[in-house]
Amino acid sequence: MRSLLTRKAVRRALRPVAELIDQRIERQVRRAVRADVRADASLDAMRQELQTLRDRQRTLEFFFDGTGRGMARLPSATHLSRLVDELAAVTGDRDEAERSAAQAFRLLLALEALGVGRIAGGTMNIVGKLSAVPLLDPPNDDVLEIGTLYGMFGAALIRMMERAGRDPRLTIVDPLAGTQLQPGTTMSDDASGTPCGRPPCAPTSPWRARPAPRPGSGRASPRTPRSAPWSPTAPTA
């Protein structure tokens, strides 16, 4: 067989076949090279798109991460669903529970974005309290807040109560001393960067502090829109 392939006549006869095989191999190689080039170009495009998305995401993260408040405000879908389930189990109205939780979450973000300082606590804890109180249909509109920090949670709760058609009256119990007074606690710089070492920590409530009603008067003192910040508050959480 080897001697047959070494003959010139046989080689001349087989040359077209060999050239055809070479052409087919070359075409396959070119296709593979072009596919690799397209894959590389597609990979580069995907990398550029991913970097663009990362750059945009960092901007959005400023609305939700813990920078300037200590705790991130980006709960998982599982946590939100669990909160809605718990509210629905108590109130019997899942649609209203979901609407209230969504409103409370947006209000939390808005107040911390526009207010002075922050609201103490985890996201789901805050959203749960803000959304649950109006849904529980309290017997009266008197609200007692023990420890107010910057005053933003009280303002948020008032807003949620008013959304439910209530006329809330807020009473705050707080030393207003500008320092942590609980036993065993130490005063440190707040995560928001807002000074709290001395009163007043700037409040964010839309109302002045109200004088207590006179005994036997049978009515509460009216609220007065503020023209200056209301009573100073102190960090207690």
Image (cartoon, helix red, strand yellow):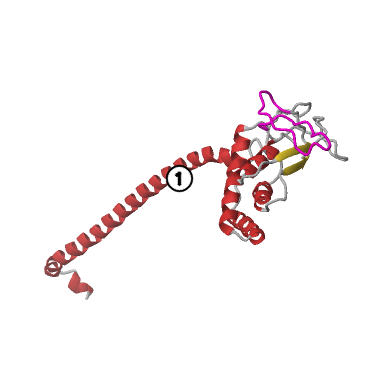
Q: Which residue is mark 1?
A: 50
The quarter holding residue 35 reads bottom left
Q: Which residue is nearer to you in this view: 1 or 209?
A: 209
- As drawn, the residue found furthest toward the right would be 183
Question: Is 123 above or below relative to 226?
Answer: below
Q: Residues within 10 Å of mark 1 (few under 14, many from 20)?
A: few
Q: Which residue is nearer to you in this view: 236 or 204?
A: 204
Q: Is residue 16 visible?
A: yes
Q: Which residues are magenta?
A: 204-230
Q: At x 68% / y 23%, what residue is drawn?
A: 228
Judged left or right of residue 182, residue 106 is: left
Identity, as a three-letter code, of the amino acid under mark 1 = Leu
Q: At x 25% / y 61%, what residue is drawn?
A: 25
Image quadrant containing the N terminus:
bottom left
Q: Is residue 65 visible?
A: no
Q: Is residue 203 magenta?
A: no
Question: Is 202 above or below relative to 99?
Answer: above
Judged left or right of residue 171, residue 105 is: left
